[in-house]
Image (tube, grey):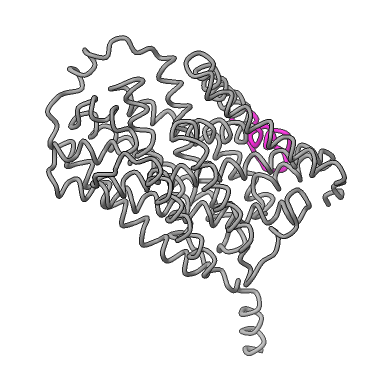
Amino acid sequence: MMIFKNRTISILRPRNKALGIPELIAIALGGMVGGGIFTVLGISVSMIGVYTPIAISIGGLFAALAAYSYIKLGVYYKDEGATYSFYKKTFPKSPFAASLIGWWVIFGYISTLALYAYTFASYAISGFAFADSEWTRKLVAGGIIAVFTLINVWSVKGMGKVEDLMVYTKLVILVVISFVLINNSDTTIPALLHDDGNVTFLNILIVASLTFVAYEGFQLVVNAVNEMEKPERNIPRAIYSAIALAILIYFVIALGAILAIPFEDIISNQEYALASGADHVLGHWGTDLVILGALLATSSAISGTLFGASRQMAVIAKDGYFPKLLAKRSRNIPVYSISAMSVFAFLLILAGNLQVILEFGSVTFLLVSMLMAYANYRVRHRTDSSPIVALIAVFGLLAGTILIIYFEASYQPEQLYFIGGLYALLTLCSWIYSRSKVLQPVA
């Protein structure tokens, strides 16, 4: 009997579950604390100055609202297709809607890959004479995407360990940078507030909406559901822990930056703001530390995004909304999806600039997160969700989307045309793939 009992236990015990809580938090933080703070800092300071830490924290609250629905749906459906699969299963009779959200979310992830790689390249060459060479920056960005494409194709466990090392090392570095900057501050918050008296609350909310893309990585945890232990417990623990840590890290870094680095330095070198300012404040070693932190942060973001989003892309392709080739796997790794995402990210880098990539990513993830909140509201009785929280998330995320569109239409209409053109192209492709597709009823 004892032998039979032991055999039963071994049969029931999960096998090949390579990712525990440390790896899952690392994947989420890798996606969030990546290009985020290094990318949005210069843009935020140029718009609202001293209020940047507040706006970034409000962006984190938007992310927490979005996370509520992702967690509820993720625990209920347990599907690595995540955003796409949740919507498809919630609205099984809407093939075009499922195809559309699949195309939007995947290209949202592709835009963040481009964002992180572009930021990596900006910091990597910041100390050289060719730091302002746009083509050098784009080629370096393509190179780092290629490196992490190979790592993700290598193995899941290998990716998880590399991600652990990069994420937790970068967190230590970012904390050191933050407190050193605060210690070397040459001004005070009251003095900065006196100089920035014309900032409105509307401007703060606009910047908070723009920074939403810096938090989008938490969704990647759900994509790893087939490689994790105890998803009912680990999905919420990993996502909420990662968002709380990201808000804290972003706030402290932004606070240290505005206190120690002159605004003109941050604004004039938006692509590598922390590195350019740290040289005057902390000296050569400080600049090297900032660059190392930025390289680790963006590297882990690239790796984590490729890992999670490629699995979602493979699921969508298996359903027929992307080319079937993208659904093929080797050793359970979606090699073709990983490669396709990398190629499209590099093409977006070649076509766009830092701000338009940032804004496309923010609009996309606000829209998609709003649709997830609506889906969660529709099945709230099955996911055991609060209808009030779900509705607050729907309207809060919709408001964030409208704020970005308002900002673009008022100040940068040409970028709005570019973003609108991308959406039109994605919508056309999703319609073409959904025309002959009839979804089977979901059990």
Residue 380: give x, y in percent of width and height: 69, 37
- Identified at 48% across, 27% down, the residue is 209
Considering only vertical position in the picture, is 233 above or below 393? below
- Identified at 32% across, 25% down, the residue is 45
Residue 86: give x, y in percent of width and height: 70, 45
Q: Is residue 421 left or right of residue 93?
A: left
Residue 319 lies in magenta, yes or no? Answer: no
Q: In which quarter of the image is the N terminus?
A: bottom right
Which of the 4 quarters of the picture holds residue 287?
top left
Which of the 4 quarters of the picture holds residue 14?
bottom right
Q: Can residue 386 be seen in this view?
A: no
Residue 379 lies in magenta, yes or no? Answer: yes
Residue 41: give x, y in percent of width and height: 34, 32
- Residue at the far top: name it: 198
Which residue is nearer to you in this view: 64 or 389?
Answer: 64
Residue 374: give x, y in percent of width and height: 68, 32
Considering only vertical position in the picture, is 424 above or below 146? above
Considering only vertical position in the picture, is 175 above or below 399? below
Which residue is nearer to you in this view: 341 or 350?
Answer: 350
Q: In this view, does 253 lie to the left or right of 440?
A: left
Which region of the structure is painted magenta?
Answer: 371-389
